[in-house]
Image (cartoon, rainbow, N blue to C red):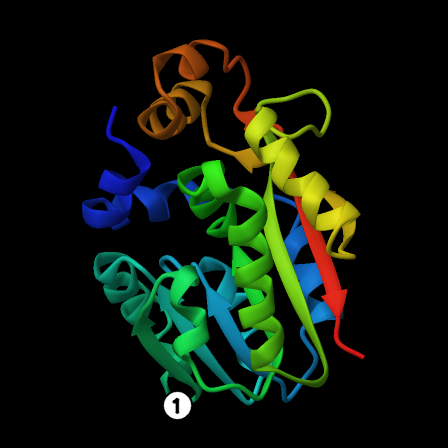
Amino acid sequence: MPTMNEIYAAHADRYDELVSREDREGSLGRELGRLVPAGAAVLELGAGTGRVTRLYAGRVRSALLCDRSAHMLGRARSNLADFRDRLEFRVLDIREAGTLEGGFDVILEGWALGHCALEEYERLSDFLSGTLAALDALLAPGGRIVLVETLGTNADRPAPPGERLARLYDLLERDHGFRRTVIRTDYEFPTVEEARRVLGFFFGPDREGRISDRIVPEWTGIWVRERG
């Protein structure tokens, strides 16, 4: 099983295979329809191969898509070719957001903050405060930050997968004023065997062995904070 960093560096095709099966009922798209207004200027951090971007790209004025993996952004350029007139791509880690120029109506992050928080865990509070301050400085008046992170895959109920992410989520809500919404983003595969193959590549043989249905439950948290 490759590491997540190895997947992001060289396996965009397998990543697309995974996320194309995610969110069978379109829950995330409905939430973004509420949170990303028509005509907005968007900064998306951790854009990956563009699956989340596609949920809002047709109605925004512009979007700057950032990811620390040039490999993933290369696939995003191809996947999002229909929206090329309003998209810009940049290889950039969320920790480098302070180098950007501001004026965004929405700053959207998908599953990138959690990865960085694990890497920065020994200084998590300082990392989070600094990162959020940098994002706040990029917001236009009345703008909002939208953070999308995992609350468990193949789980019966939503919960942070591990104490470290639990601490991150607690800091977001307790110290930084974010409000959480929980949604279902279940995967749907044609067969149980396909579910095991695809998810096993990402999550390992132990998780693969616990999959017993072609529909695999997943919980996602959306944390939102608006600028006054």
- Left or right, 123 with respect to 59, comes to left
> Label 1, on which residue?
85
Comparing 81 with 121, the one in front is 121
87 in relation to 195, above or below: below
Residue 111 is situated, as x and y percent measured from the top left of the image, at 50, 48
Q: How many marks?
A: 1
- In the rendered structure, the answer to whether residue 61 lies left or right of residue 222 reads left
Residue positioned 31% across, 59% down in the render: 68
Taking the spot 47% from the left edge, 36% from the top edge, the residue there is 122
Residue 125 on image: x %, y %: 59, 46
**Which amino acid does the dot numbered 1 rest on?**
Asp
* SS label for mark 1: helix
Quadrant in which the C terminus is drawn: bottom right
**Quadrant position of residue 18:** top left
Q: Is residue 42 among the parts visible in the rendering?
A: yes
Image x and y of residue 183, in percent: 72, 44
Image point (57%, 24%), residue name: 162
Find the residue positioned furthest to the left: 10
Q: How many residues crowd mark 1 within 10 Å: few (<14), some (14–19), many (20+)?
A: few
171 to 89, vertically: above or below: above
Q: Residue at x 24, y 30 (%)?
A: 2
Q: Can residue 185 be seen in this snapshot?
A: no
Whether 140 is drawn above or below 76: the answer is below
The x and y percentages for residue 67 are: 35, 62
> From the image, which quarter does the N terminus lie in?
top left
For this view, does 118 lie left or right of residue 90? right
Hey, which quadrant is residue 39 in on the image? bottom right
127 or 178, nearer to the observer:
127
